Image (cartoon, rainbow, N blue to C red):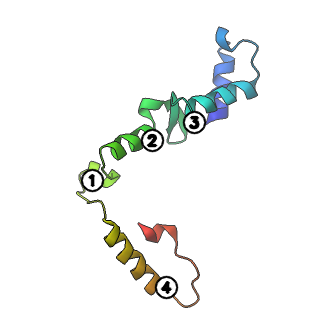
Amino acid sequence: GRYACAQILAARQLSFLHGRSLGEISHIIQLAISQKKLLGYMKGNVVPYKFSQSMAKERLASEKQTKSSASGDDLELASWETIRSGLLELIDNMHLDQETIPLSNMK
């Protein structure tokens, strides 16, 4: 994660990080992830943004694809009417003692 990445960078004694605390380096990494999109996460590891899960999701969104359709499952994006009727069906099928619907059921 972010902290482990900061430790590795601090151990390399890079000139541009000279005099920075581990907390400051960790903050720089956070900014590189959240604001500058220089870094991202893949399976819990900090990686260059172009290899990150965020980049993959952005690319799919810009192509208006779902993760499944990109892998060849040919799932179509649902229309708002389909979503509405699906949600109504979930609500209608709730048990009397059930106050919430698990998020996993929403997919």
Neighbourhood count class around disc 2 (C-alpha, 10 Å): few under 14, some 14–19, many 20 upward: some
Residue type for callout 2:
Gln
Question: What residue appears at the point 64 percent right and 23 percent down from the top-left corner?
Answer: 8
Question: Picture coordinates of residue 78 (x, y %)?
Answer: 31, 64
39 or 11: nearer the viewer: 39
Per the image, the residue denoted by label 2 is: 53
Residue pushed farthest front?
A: 80
Label whose residue precedes the other's in the sequence (4 or 1): 1
CA–CA distance between discs 3 and 2?
13 Å
Q: Above or below — where is 76 with respect to 9? A: below
Label whose residue precedes the other's in the sequence (3 or 2): 3
Label 2 sits on a secondary structure element that is helix
Label 3 sits on a secondary structure element that is helix
Label whose residue precedes the other's in the sequence (4 or 2): 2
Per the image, the residue denoted by label 3 is: 34
Question: What residue appears at the point 45 percent right and 71 percent down from the top-left corner?
Answer: 105
Question: Picture coordinates of residue 27 (x, y %)?
Answer: 68, 30
Label whose residue precedes the other's in the sequence (3 or 4): 3
Question: Picture coordinates of residue 58 (x, y %)?
Answer: 40, 41
Question: Picture coordinates of residue 30 (x, y %)?
Answer: 63, 33
Per the image, the residue denoted by label 4 is: 94
- Whether the residues at callouts 3 and 1 have beta carbons within 8 Å, the answer is no
Question: Could one spot residue 25 in this view of the protein?
Answer: yes
Question: Could one spot residue 14 in this view of the protein?
Answer: no
Per the image, the residue denoted by label 1 is: 69
Q: Nearer the viewer, mark 3 or mark 4?
A: 3
Question: What residue appears at the point 57 percent right and 36 percent down from the top-left corner?
Answer: 34
Label whose residue precedes the other's in the sequence (3 or 1): 3
